[in-house]
């Protein structure tokens, strides 16, 4: 006996407050004849990009549709509607999937139902309110340290009046039994669909500027899924606050290449001999230059005045065709009498001073060096100037260990002792994006993949 043809609409969406940042997805299966929701799904997925969240929403929606009609087989027809042009075009086969981290997600989505059973349509965001609301509810739940619950959802308030009638028609089938099966299938699918956390962090080295085309590396513009406004009088802080809609100022922090002192782990600040790059360091600078040339995202270059940074910056500038601006505030800490010494040598010669320095950011190295508090003050001032000057742009800062760690520490709101808990290799890359509302997002820390 033949199975009656079943036709449903799936609307799906995903969002990230930071891109990458705290992310979630939402999906709803809809009866195309009445516009009523048959099943909903939403989940907070931790830190991810918009693209990852959107694909996760698609996977959840298709999983729910299949669970509603487990016996339909090829008789099931699903019409997917999303406001992500990237996902729609890639799943329709019109755009290639180039990013290696997107391919497994697309493959998982494609394997849920036979390709001939699924069609895709791009819709404006205004017509995707139900899934958008679910995604925001999931992100709000994650912010509050809880999981999204269907019983608390307000997404149904958007349906069906805000939805344009779908071009497909067909009976929805047994809704009550199917909805229960859909919930069970979604619970089982959540863990299997989640990419590894380290892969999520690697998806977007640079943010996409507001208004730009969607890309596999950065997703939709970062303002695509703002957090809902909180009630009057509620402090607007952190990633739960409504974000500024402008593109961030992105500071890409490149540590200089090795000098002769680097592999020996000697104190090398702004009060020492100002060493040049070693042969290894020059090779690292060239590989960093090739990395940034391939990315094509850096628009300005600013360097510490010290020689090792100027040489590293010059290598990158030559490849990018950019000038280098010198900023005195990006210089390394002055380590005073410790310059050129190893940690062990300082412990032997200035043991009490070293112990005091490790215990307090206000203590300076022996012989009139700088304290970490002093360094933080000048780095914070430099940050404010740079963020104001390069709003909406990506600037490469070629600098040193302490300034880079300080940029990251301040962005995270971490205490001064966090400086001793960060590893920062020569020629490594760290990225911090600063938004107009005062929030910051640390994208990368100590990335050396370009050196391999």
Image (cartoon, helix red, strand yellow):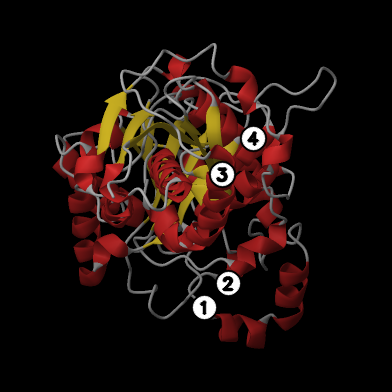
Q: Is label 1 in a helix, a strand or a loop?
A: loop
Q: Residue 104: which numbered mark, if any?
A: none
Between 123 and 366, the one nearer to me in the picture:
123
Looking at the image, residue 209 sits to the left or right of residue 406; the answer is left
- The residue at 57%/42% (across/down) is 42
Q: Residue 338: which numbered mark, if any?
A: 2
Residue 205 location (% of width, % of height): 37, 46
- Asked if labels 2 and 1 touch by Cβ distance under 8 angstroms, the answer is yes
- The residue at 36%/19% (across/down) is 166
- Whole-number angstrom distance, CA of label 1 to CA of label 3: 68 Å
- The residue at 18%/44% (across/down) is 293
- Whole-number angstrom distance, CA of label 4 to CA of label 1: 55 Å
Q: Residue 179: which numbered mark, if any?
A: 3
The earlier-in-sequence mark between 4 and 2 is 4
Q: Quadrant of the C terminus?
A: bottom left
The earlier-in-sequence mark between 4 and 3 is 4
- Whole-number angstrom distance, CA of label 4 to CA of label 2: 54 Å
- Whole-number angstrom distance, CA of label 1 to CA of label 2: 6 Å
Q: Residue 341: which numbered mark, if any?
A: 1
The residue tagged 4 is: 137
- Whole-number angstrom distance, CA of label 3 to CA of label 2: 69 Å
Residue 77 location (% of width, % of height): 30, 37
- The residue at 40%/48% (across/down) is 66
Between 366 and 121, the one nearer to me in the picture:
121
Q: Residues within 10 Å of mark 4 (few under 14, many from 20)?
A: many
Q: Residues within 10 Å of mark 3 (few under 14, many from 20)?
A: many
Q: Is label 2 in a helix, a strand or a loop?
A: helix
The earlier-in-sequence mark between 4 and 1 is 4
Between 339 and 312, the one nearer to me in the picture:
312
């Amino acid at each position: 006996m033949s199975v009656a043809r079943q036709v449903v609409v799936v609307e799906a969406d995903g969002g990230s407050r930071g891109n990458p940042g705290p992310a979630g997805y939402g999906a709803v299966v809809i009866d195309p004849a009445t516009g009523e929701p048959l099943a909903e799904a939403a989940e907070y997925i931790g830190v991810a990009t918009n693209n990852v969240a959107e694909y996760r929403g698609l996977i959840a929606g298709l999983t729910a549709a299949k669970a509603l009609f487990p016996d339909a087989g090829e008789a099931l027809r699903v019409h997917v509607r999303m406001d992500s042009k990237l996902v729609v075009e890639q799943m329709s086969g019109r755009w290639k999937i180039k990013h290696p981290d997107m391919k497994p997600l697309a493959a998982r989505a494609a394997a849920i139902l036979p390709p001939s059973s699924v069609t895709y349509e791009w819709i404006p965001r205004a017509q995707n309110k139900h899934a958008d609301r679910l995604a925001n509810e999931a992100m709000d739940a994650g912010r509050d340290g809880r999981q999204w619950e269907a019983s608390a959802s307000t997404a149904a308030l958007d349906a069906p009046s805000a939805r344009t009638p779908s071009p497909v028609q067909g009976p929805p089938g047994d809704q009550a039994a199917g909805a229960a099966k859909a919930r069970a299938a979604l619970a089982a699918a959540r863990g299997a669909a989640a990419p590894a956390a380290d892969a999520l962090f690697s998806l977007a080295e640079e943010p996409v500027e507001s208004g730009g085309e969607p890309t596999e590396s950065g997703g939709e513009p970062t303002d695509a899924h703002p957090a809902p406004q909180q009630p009057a009088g509620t402090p607007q802080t952190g990633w739960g606050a409504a974000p500024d809609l402008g593109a961030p100022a992105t500071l890409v922090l490149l540590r200089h290449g090795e000098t002769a002192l680097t592999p020996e782990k000697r104190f090398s600040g702004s009060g020492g001999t100002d060493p040049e790059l070693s042969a290894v360091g020059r090779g690292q600078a060239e590989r960093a230059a090739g990395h940034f040339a391939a990315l094509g995202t850096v628009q300005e270059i600013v360097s510490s005045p010290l020689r090792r940074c100027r040489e590293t910056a010059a290598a990158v500038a030559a490849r990018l065709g950019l000038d280098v601006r010198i900023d005195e505030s990006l210089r390394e800490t002055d380590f005073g009498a410790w310059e050129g010494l190893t940690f062990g040598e300082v412990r032997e010669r200035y043991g009490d001073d070293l112990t005091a320095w490790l215990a307090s950011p206000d203590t300076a190295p022996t012989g009139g060096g700088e304290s970490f508090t002093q360094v933080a003050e000048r780095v914070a001032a430099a940050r404010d100037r740079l963020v104001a000057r390069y709003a909406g742009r990506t600037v490469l800062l070629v600098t040193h260990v302490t300034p880079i760690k300080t940029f990251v520490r301040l962005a995270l709101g971490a205490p001064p002792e966090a400086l001793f808990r960060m590893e920062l290799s020569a020629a490594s890359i760290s990225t911090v994006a600063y938004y107009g509302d005062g929030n910051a997002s640390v994208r990368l820390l100590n990335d050396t993949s370009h050196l391999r």
